Image: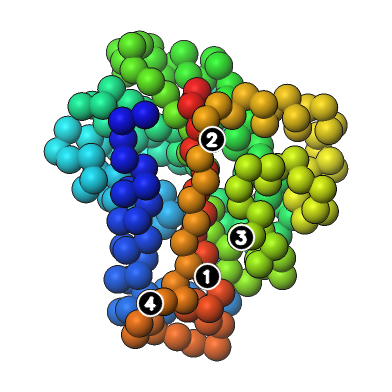
Amino acid sequence: MQTKLGAVFEEYHSIYDRIFKRIYPAKGNNGFNEENQTVNFSKAFEKICGDNSFSWFELNIKNRGRIDAVLFNIDAREIFIVESKQFWGDKELRDSFSDIERILDYGEIEILKSNFCYKDYSFFGIVLADVWLNKDRDRIVENWKEGFWTGTDDFSKLSENWEIDTINEIVGKLKNQKWYSGNFKKSLDIVEAKYSIKNKYNLLMTCWEL
């Protein structure tokens, strides 16, 4: 991968930091719409990758709904399929695994290649997430690394929807997976309310080759 994803994630985190220093973007503890993850990550991506990069949102694919975003780095000849989630609880953790399964769908990648005429480009999958007031927040953040989906901790509860062999098969397809996380504990002048952003809010990202 030529795209500097580490730098993109740092800029993504900085965008949130600048926002949080100006507003508390929620009513009480009702959370932040996951669309903000997609949009702000794409802004960071385009800033780091330069003028020859762009994003497209809510792309219709086959009969399985929409992809949150597809990001194009033309200079690097790389395309990123992005899905975003709020980790409120077990349901969202399961849903994010469904997103991974959908991104891995070979047919979807072939449709993208035919739609965008970029058959010789490298493709990558990205799942963005945030975790704030989930009761298992600390455990999720601590385990956001290799083994997250196949660990023995019961917080993911993926076995309610998939057989263990299926989970292992899907995870086995995540080639050269990388993990990123960021909190705001060192940030200054964050606008706070009853539910602390500074001490509790975390941004998460994982990426792999397709």
How far apart marks 2 and 3 lie (CA) works out to: 17 Å
* Residue 58 visible in the picture: no
How far apart marks 4 and 1 lie (CA) works out to: 12 Å
How far apart marks 4 and 2 lie (CA) works out to: 28 Å
Residue at image position (39%, 15%) is 113
Pick whichever of labels 1 and 2 is earlier in the sequence.
2
Q: Amino acid at mark 1?
A: Tyr
Give the vertical position of 23 relative to 110 (above or below).
below
Q: Which mark is residue 177?
A: 2
Decide: few, some or many residues near mark 3? Use Cα within 10 Å; few <14, some 14-19, many ≥20.
some
How far apart marks 1 and 2 lie (CA) works out to: 23 Å
Pointer 3: what residue? Answer: 141
Residue 90, how many percent across, how many down?
Answer: 74, 55
Pick whichever of labels 2 and 3 is earlier in the sequence.
3
Q: Amino acid at mark 3?
A: Val
* Element assignment for label 2: strand
How far apart marks 4 and 3 lie (CA) works out to: 18 Å
* Element assignment for label 1: loop
Callouts 4 and 3 close, C-beta under 8 Å: no
Q: Which mark is residue 105?
A: none
Pointer 1: what residue? Answer: 201
Pointer 4: what residue? Answer: 187
Residue 76, how many percent across, how many down?
Answer: 26, 26
* Residue 97 visible in the picture: yes
Q: Amino acid at mark 4?
A: Ser
Give the vertical position of 160 relative to 184 (above or below).
above
Give the vertical position of 148 relative to 56 (above or below).
below
Residue 52, how many percent across, how many down?
Answer: 17, 33
Pick whichever of labels 1 and 3 is earlier in the sequence.
3
Q: Is residue 21 left or right of residue 53?
A: right
